[in-house]
Amino acid sequence: MTQSSLQNTSYILAVETSCDETSVSVIKNGREVLVNLIASQIETHKAFGGVVPEVASRKHVEVITLIMEQAIEASGIQPKDLSAIAVTQGPGLVGALLVGIVAAKTLAMALEKPLIGTHHIAGHIYANRLVEEIEYPAMALVVSGGHTELTHIPSEGKFEVIGRTRDDAVGEAYDKVARALGCPYPGGPHVDRMAHEAETVTPLPRVWLEPGSYDFSFSGLKSAVLNIVNQASMKGVTLDRSSVARGFQESVVEVLVEKAVRAVRAYGSKQLLLSGGVAANKGLRKALEERCAKENIKLLIPPMEYCTDNAAMIGAAAYLKWERGMFSDLKMQAEPGLSLENWSVE
């Protein structure tokens, strides 16, 4: 590669350690994934039935340096040719975030490259641009273990959260229901599978909140499932777990789809972007695809590998700041409650 071509091309090395995946990626021009390595901790946390923050942090420390070295080697890019180092600044588990931030700062200082602190949810949203160009204004439905939000994106890199969960996020609700139904961690995929296998459905409530609200609430739905499970146990009745899983999933999906479609219409969005780990849920993907086709709404959904936490999405979002020369100070700190709206580009 010639020096002139390098000057017209950006290569961002991105680091993601917000929860229980250690991931490093190299992204070309904000859209092309050269390499995306992920070290998952699922097997470690299975024994605890969920993510243990202290354990997650230690696992990140064990592998982060090796994965960074492997990513650079696999990308075919020399370290000196990297344009910037991006890292998830928040939101996330503070200890886990710190591991990635320290590693990214160290590499940025060693190579004398700019540092870009990146918002985790902006990453989930812009994972869609790894697949197809985003048209504005757009609407993003973010569904993950810690977040359930509807975000209006009036222009590139500008975020306005118009609705959010008031209690459990979708992923949290799935995990709690999965535990109640006796599913192993992580429970979401098991509930999704059982819902598809069910021949009957257990009726469960839909929580719409106030008329016109784009907020969500899944705590009551979760409690309704727990009540059904407890009553069956007390009465000694065999519970049809698949039927309950289907009822739960249909309730969640109907509310998510209806509010997302309503938001698209109200804000004149050209696209609906599905983002976050729960975007891998087959029931939600199918329902959105069918409804958006019926409503003539253009729907973008990232491939499965870019739905769950990964560094490629962080590189895609960091490119927004790279283009505008918006770099972070080396004194940057982890921010577990980092605001998406405040992270917007200028």
Image (spheres, rainbow, N blue to C red):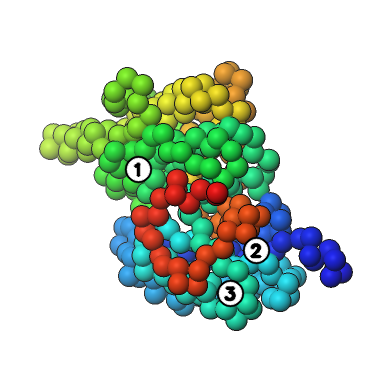
Q: Tell me the SS state at disc 1.
A: loop
Instruction: Decide which of tag 1 and tag 2 comes sooner along the chain.
Output: 2
The amino acid type of the residue labelled 1 equals: Ala
Between marks 1 and 2, how big is the CA–CA gap? Answer: 31 Å
Between marks 3 and 2, how big is the CA–CA gap? Answer: 11 Å
Instruction: Decide which of tag 3 and tag 2 comes sooner along the chain.
Output: 2
Residue drawn at point x = 65 percent, y = 63 percent: 12
Question: Dot 2 surroundings within 10 Å: few (below 14), some, or many (20 or more)?
Answer: many
Task: Please provide percent x and percent y for residue 41.
Answer: 44, 65
Kindly give the residue lying farthest to the left in the view shown: 234
Q: Tell me the SS state at disc 3.
A: helix
Task: Please provide percent x and percent y for residue 118.
Answer: 51, 58
- Can residue 30 be spotted in the picture? yes
Residue drawn at point x = 58 percent, y = 32 percent: 137
Between marks 3 and 1, how big is the CA–CA gap? Answer: 34 Å
Q: How many badges with numbers are in the image?
A: 3
Residues under numbered marks 3 and 1 in contact, where contact means CB atoms less than 8 Å apart: no
Residue drawn at point x = 44 percent, y = 35 percent: 150
Task: Please provide percent x and percent y for residue 325.
Answer: 62, 59
Residue drawn at point x = 27 percent, y = 41 percent: 167
Q: Which mark, by number, is residue 169?
A: 1
Q: Which mark, by number, is residue 12?
A: 2
Judge left or right: residue 98 versus residue 35.
left
Question: Quarter of the image containing the N terminus?
Answer: bottom right
Camera-nearest label, 3 or 1 = 3
Camera-nearest label, 1 or 2 = 2
Question: Dot 1 surroundings within 10 Å: few (below 14), some, or many (20 or more)?
Answer: many
Which image quarter: residue 28?
bottom right
Q: To which residue does mark 3 refer?
A: 108
Which image quarter: residue 173?
top left
